[in-house]
Amino acid sequence: MNFRTPIPALFPGASGRIVTALTAHQATNTGAPLSPTDLARDASVAATQVEATLFRLGLLGLIEPRERGGDVRLVAGHVVWKALDGLADLRQRVVEEVRERAAADLIPAPARLAIAGPVADGTATHPADVLELIVVPPSTAPENWSEQADRMAARLSRHLGNVVTLRTAATDADAARFAGPEASLIIPPDCAVTLAGGVGGSSG
């Protein structure tokens, strides 16, 4: 699953690319008009494909009434754009899913849990792309704790549609080395942040 731009994967073809471009435009240029030429360029499609898709979007009330060839203005408050905006970049949803699964599956909670890899950084383009979990077990981990962690990784693989791997580190320093400086810290549960100093660094 491509978590940077999943809409074209869900809606293949020109329409998916056009809707992706419009969703990105809505997120960064709320209310600003967009010419069909610019939209065709942003979506990498032909102008004729743009007009056909815009006609269907107009029937759904997603864009303001327009003449053929005229600028496109989105109906910014439309419920569909709000839903599509949630699909446009799922990285934060990935963080939330990992946090929820860890809270439900890992008892007691790990001392540290970080995520890294293409799924975590939003560059995944294929189900074979990996979400890496780097975990430091709690100091009082029961005997079955590693089995809990393996089950959590398996559940995440199903829920995300990507391969999830698990690396266990004995110390924060080991975890930082495994994860690299761009990993996102999930536990301790401040908020997920990119750790400039690695998993062992400050989360502030």
Image (cartoon, rainbow, N blue to C red):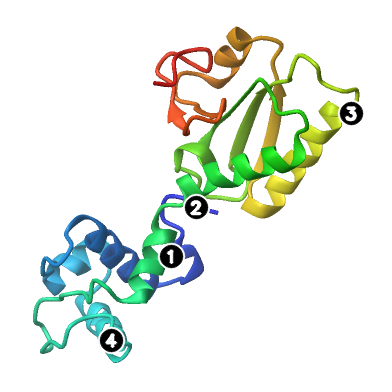
Residue labelled with disc 2: 2
Q: Dot 4, how many residues are within 10 Å of its Cα: few (below 14), some (14-19), or many (20+)? A: some
Residue drawn where x is 78% and y is 32% of the image: 107
Q: Is residue 42 left or right of 140 when viewed as pictured? A: left
18 relative position to 157: left or right: left
Q: In terms of sequence position, does the residue under pointer 1 or pointer 2 come before the other?
A: 2
Name the element at disc 3: loop
Percent from the top left, x then y, of residue 69? 10, 83
Residue type at mark 3 is: Asn
Q: Secondary structure at mark 4?
A: loop
Q: What amino acid type is highlighted by mark number 4?
A: Gly
Which residue was labeled with disc 3? Answer: 144
Q: Residues within 10 Å of mark 2 (few under 14, many from 20)?
A: many
Tell me the distance, in whole angstroms, between the alpha carbons under discs 3 and 4.
54 Å
In the image, 112 versus 43, the foreground residue is: 112
Give residue 42's position: percent from left, percent from top: 23, 61
Q: Which residue is mark 1?
A: 8
The residue sitting at 30% across, 64% down in the picture is 23
Residue at image location 28% in from the left, 80% down from the top: 62
Q: Amino acid at mark 1?
A: Pro
Query: Circle 4 is placed at which residue position?
Result: 61
Of circles 3 and 4, the one toward us is 3
From the viewer's perspective, is residue 54 above or below residue 99? below
Q: Are marks 1 and 2 in contact (CB under 8 Å)?
A: yes
Dividing the picture into quarters, in which one does residue 29 lie? bottom left
- Seen at 27% across and 69% down, the residue is 45
Tag 1 secondary structure: helix
Lower position in the chain sequence, tag 3 or tag 2 = 2
Identified by mark 2, the residue type is: Asn
Mark 1: give few (<14), some (14-19) or many (20+) Cα within 10 Å: some
Please identify the quadrant where the N terminus is shown. bottom right
